[in-house]
């Protein structure tokens, strides 16, 4: 049998990383992610475990080596363990290098053991502040103690953790030192993410936006930052913090575009394939479900030929421009 050709986009970029959103729903309402009264997709549009796995399987057959389960909040999906079990087989057979999860951590204490048992070794946990009141405000009701308890449980279960911190102007400046000490004191990396103009959240994007190139120069006045070769298979570029020995990542879609090296595609919980988070376009993979692996493979390769060269997010005098209507919670980053 001749080997399956690699998944390659129209710009010659090899696609090896699938981000699979298992639900757009969430138990939090972070101010940079969604509005307080979010309209979620209808339950009938959410694919079941079998269909989600069939789609993911077509990507794995095409040479995807890493899958990230995300959302919304993936750990609120009740049948997530059944999906994890399927991927565990791919990991055992060497068909996948890594299965990773992005979570807000609120249910991590309950599910850390299940994740480890399915072969998950690394999770990203969102954490923007260590102040319980500020956390409640940013997440519109979340309890910091749940996340910190979840992180402790995940570390005890043997998971490696990277904290994801959205660089929120007016928050991150006051929190970063404590967050670095907290993360690095527990052997966790921390990544700062520039806020992106995805969907209306009822809160000013420009007011929240802090360019990370300038913030990094501020950090260098009190921390010793040395460029690190560390990579996590995504868009973060890392420095090592001399005082703690830990890693700090910068994810800079606006201040420093990283699209030239993009290796990722995303599938929503409704079975739509998005070849770029920063564009509205998507291809519905559902019609190919049930037709057979060849139809899915053809739909995926057809969509990849039209993967955009780059997103259009940029900073303009009037606000963050190039934004799109879809909220971050549909695809999960
Ligand atoms: N619920 C999970 C969580 O919070 O980690 C997974 C989904 S969440 C949408 C994935 C990541 O996107 C989180 O780290 C979150 O902080 C980040 N995020 C959400 N909205 C964003 C935005 N508008 N710009 C930049 N990052 C955003
Ligand atoms: Fe939920 Fe994650 Fe969005 Fe916060 S960032 S509202 S936790 S999906």
Image (cartoon, rainbow, N blue to C red):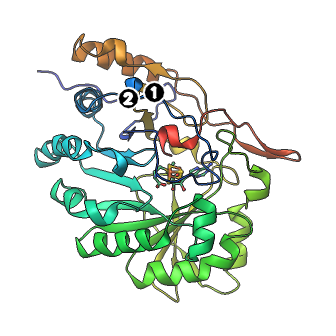
Label 2 sits on residue: 46
Residue sitting at x 74%, y 50%: 203
Measured from the top left, where is residue 118 in percent x and y?
17, 53
Element under label 2?
Answer: loop
Q: Is residue 328 left or right of residue 62?
A: right
Q: Is residue 203 left or right of residue 159?
A: right
| Residue 301 found in image quarter | top left
From what the image shows, is residue 122 above or below residue 92?
below
Label 1 sits on residue: 42
Q: Pointer 2: residues within 10 angstroms few (<14), some, or many (20+)?
A: some
From what the image shows, is residue 228 above or below residue 75?
below
Q: Nearer the viewer, residue 249 or 72?
A: 72
What mark, if any, has residue 130 been given in the picture? none
Cα gap from disc 2 to disc 1, whole angstroms: 7 Å
From what the image shows, is residue 174 above or below residue 5?
below
Residue sitting at x 79%, y 57%: 207
Measured from the top left, where is residue 213 in percent x and y?
70, 64
Residue sitting at x 22%, y 18%: 293
Measured from the top left, where is residue 317 in percent x and y?
89, 47
**In this view of the protein, can residue 271 be seen by the observer?**
no
Q: Is residue 37 left or right of residue 100?
A: right
Residue sitting at x 23%, y 41%: 83
Q: Nearer the viewer, residue 92 or 88?
A: 88
**In this view of the protein, can residue 20 be seen by the observer?**
yes
Element under label 1?
Answer: loop
Callout 2 touching callout 1 (CB < 8 Å)? yes
Q: Quadrant of the N terminus?
A: top left
Q: Nearer the viewer, residue 306 or 40?
A: 40
Q: Nearer the viewer, mark 2 or mark 1?
A: 1
């Amino acid at each position: 049998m001749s080997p399956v050709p690699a998944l390659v986009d129209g710009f010659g970029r090899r696609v090896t990383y699938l981000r699979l959103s298992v639900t757009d729903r969430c138990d939090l309402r972070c101010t940079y992610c969604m509005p307080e009264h979010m309209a979620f997709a209808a339950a009938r549009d959410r694919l079941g475990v079998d269909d989600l796995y069939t789609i993911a399987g077509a990507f794995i057959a095409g040479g995807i080596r890493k899958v990230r389960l995300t959302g919304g909040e993936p750990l609120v999906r009740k049948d997530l363990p059944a999906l994890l079990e399927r991927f565990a087989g791919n990991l055992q057979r060497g068909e996948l290098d890594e299965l990773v999860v992005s979570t807000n951590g609120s249910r991590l204490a309950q599910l850390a053991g299940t994740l480890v048992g399915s072969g998950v070794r690394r999770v990203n946990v969102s954490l923007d502040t260590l102040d319980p009141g500020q956390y409640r405000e940013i997440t519109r009701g979340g309890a910091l103690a749940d996340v910190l308890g979840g992180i402790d449980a995940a570390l005890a279960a043997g998971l490696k953790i990277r904290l994801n911190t959205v660089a929120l102007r007016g928050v991150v400046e006051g929190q970063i030192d404590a967050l670095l000490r907290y993360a690095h004191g527990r052997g966790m990396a921390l990544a700062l993410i520039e806020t992106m103009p995805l969907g209306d959240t009822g809160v000013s994007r420009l007011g929240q936006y802090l360019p990370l190139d300038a913030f990094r120069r501020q950090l260098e006045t009190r921390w010793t930052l040395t460029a690190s070769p560390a990579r996590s298979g995504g868009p973060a570029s890392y420095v090592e913090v001399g005082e703690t020995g830990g890693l700090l990542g910068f994810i800079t879609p606006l201040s420093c575009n990283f699209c030239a090296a993009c290796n990722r595609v995303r599938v929503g919980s409704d079975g739509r394939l998005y070849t770029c988070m920063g564009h509205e376009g998507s291809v519905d993979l559902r019609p190919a479900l049930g037709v057979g692996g060849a139809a899915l493979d053809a739909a995926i390769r057809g969509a990849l030929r039209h993967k955009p060269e780059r997103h259009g997010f940029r900073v303009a005098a009037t606000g963050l421009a190039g934004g799109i209507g879809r909220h971050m919670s549909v695809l999960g980053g």
